[in-house]
Image (cartoon, grey):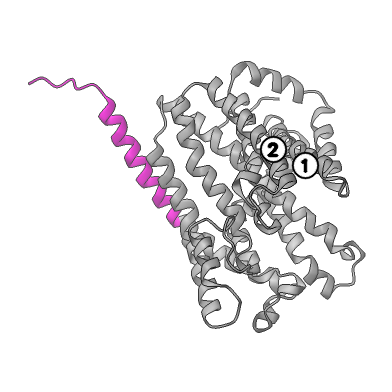
Amino acid sequence: MQARTTGTYLPTLDGWRAIAIALVLLAHASDSIQNAIDFSAFSNTDTLKKFGMLGVQLFFGLSGFLITSKLMDEEFRHGKISLKSFYIRRAFRILPASTFFLAIAGILALTGLIDISLGRWLSALLFSANYTHADHSWYLGHFWSLAVEEHFYFLWPAAFLLLGVSRRRTALAIFAALLIALWRAVDFKFQLTGSAPDVFWGRTDIQADSILWGVLVALLYGERSWQLRLQKFYSLPASWPTLVIALLAIQSIPDLNWKLNFLLISIKAVLIPLVILGTVIQHSALAGRILETPILRWLGRLSYSLYLWQQLFLVWNDDRAPALAWLQIFPSNLLAVFACATVSMLFIENPLIAAGHRIASRIARRSTSDDRPNTTHA
């Protein structure tokens, strides 16, 4: 089956975003569903809660793969990339919706409806929530993963531009991913930084290898020789199902000793972008067709706003706010999440994303014009 070019719009990835956000929603809604419905599938909510982290790791793998693919595509089409245009597009994509959510959360905190300290709120606003020791708040707890992604968006495009050569980019991605995996184990074993567990597991220097393996898969697939090898591998009927089974098996394994746990974390980080790539290459196979169904593509496009707003309404039992109790019970909590996310996407995300692209396009055109040789005569 014909593969798609990386860097172009890939509807399959919207489907993966839908899977990722569905796992997060399921994990965070598990307590409220169990409270409302005596359903055996929700009898062990601890198991379901573990799948929320898998959803976050899917988002990480997707980010590494997609951003790198877009950078390669821009370089191929224009001969270079514009960091200014990239950062403008990312700023208009991420900041308006997150700032709007933080404004609403801040108002709720000031009125005493939910508990958020000023330090926690500021760390979320400044994308440093995964390093702060400010008082924990469930309602901003998800900003640790947004901070990891923002740090990646800030650092990787600049490294991509500076390295220039594909071989150097690939070497950096491999080296950095392996170094982070080693550092994670060493810091955990010897407590070199002394971070509390809730801070340790959210830090960029502990989690970023999940993004870097996505970067590596995109870099390899952008090389013609590797593209042919990967297409041949995924043409084998058992290749993609084997990767999926391995990923789910690792996800289902109970905690072992810490060394094996850390090894499995790294293997899972490698498997996720490989599973994603298989559906990009074999997009007309059954899995690809399912991921590209209209409902999953819509859910994927809504996923960022859903990720922001679900934290306000999908609350575990110990963190509920009495003043919002009627909005934190199933199914009204899910309805509230989708209502707020839809408003955010339609009236904040979409208009400002479009504005960011217009500004970035003008900058790119101006840059291209400035690079043309001057052929006018005095």
Residue 377 placement: quadrant: top left
Tell me how many marks there are: 2
Residue 252: tell me if it is visible: yes
Q: Which percent across, then down, holds residue 182? A: 69, 36
**Residue 256 appears left or right of 20:** right
Of 185 and 106, nearer the camera is 185
Q: Residue furthest top?
A: 225
- Residue range (magenta): 351-378
**Label 2 belongs to which residue?**
181
Going from the N terminus, do you reach mark 1 or mark 2 first?
2
Contact check, label 1 and label 2, Cβ < 8 Å: yes
Query: Is the residue marked by circle 1 packed among few (<14), some (14-19), or many (20+) residues within 10 Å?
Result: some
* Quarter of the view holding residue 21: bottom right
Residue 372 falls inside the magenta stretch: yes
Q: Main secondary structure of the magenta part?
A: helix
Kindly identify which numbered label has been placed on residue 262: 1
Q: Quadrant of the N terminus?
A: top right
Q: Is residue 273 above or below residue 58?
A: above
Left/right placement of residue 174 relative to residue 258 reads left
Q: Give the Cα distance between marks 1 and 2.
A: 8 Å
Q: From what the image shows, is residue 366 above or below residue 130?
A: above
Q: Secondary structure at mark 1?
A: helix
